[in-house]
Amino acid sequence: MKYIAITCAERQHYIGYLKARIPMLKIAFDDFTDAKQFSSTAFFNHQKAWSMAGNEAAVIMEDDILLCDSFTDIIESVIADRPSDVIQFFSMRKKDLTEGSRYEPGRTFMMCQCFYLPAGTASELYEFSIDYAETSKDRTCPSDPCIAAFLKSKKLKYWIHCPNLVDHRVGKSLLGPRSSKRQSKTFQL
């Protein structure tokens, strides 16, 4: 299984923190030259990560996250229970507190802070995303809706794991106006 983090020059200072906790981490670096039609190239960096994963199972993460203690041991245990499911390790939904871990319809996928793609899924998602990029009306950050559209097209559900294993750092988004306080309701160090 591959661990892949997406980053860019403005956020690469976060990578040291992640690499210290995940030594085998691979980096998808966004040099902002891949896309001209989007106001943000984060989508194309996600595509780069999906391409890097190829047919292997992969944990894809963004650089601006905090990890729970014993992250790799816990995430690998959770994945071992559901190796064929897409699993999300960050969420901000009220149901996280009332229902806990659960399946959700693929069309509802959002928040790409940290998620698992089973073997073969990243390459399928990458191929799907090529057409999605050409037809998307979203010009800011279509990664989340692309994944949701992909899961919906395959009639797949995904698993939200609670408590969340990562949290989103408090800070300004590079993707435009968004709340700086997009934190998990269930994250525990």
Image: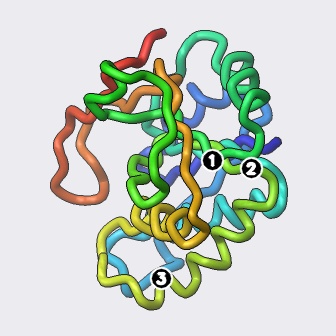
Residue type for callout 1? Val
Residue type for callout 2? Pro
| Quadrant, the N terminus | top right
Residue 177 located left or right of residue 7: left
Residue type for callout 3? Ala
Residue 125 located left or right of residue 40: right
Q: Which residue is drawn at 80% across and 63% down?
A: 54
- Earlier in the chain: of badge 1 and badge 3, it is 1
Task: From the image, tell me which residue sits under label 1.
Answer: 86
Task: From the image, tell me which residue sits under label 2.
Answer: 118
Q: In this view, does 110 lie above or below 152?
A: above
Residue 113 is situated, as x and y percent measured from the top left of the image, at: 47, 42
Residue 41 is situated, as x and y percent measured from the top left of the image, at: 43, 70
SS label for mark 1: strand
Q: Are marks 1 and 2 in contact (CB under 8 Å)?
A: yes
Q: Which residue is drawn at 50% across and 62% down?
A: 147
Q: In this view, does 39 lie above or below 86?
A: below
Tell me the mark number nearer the camera, choosing from 1 and 3. 1
Residue in front for this viewpoint, 25 or 148: 148
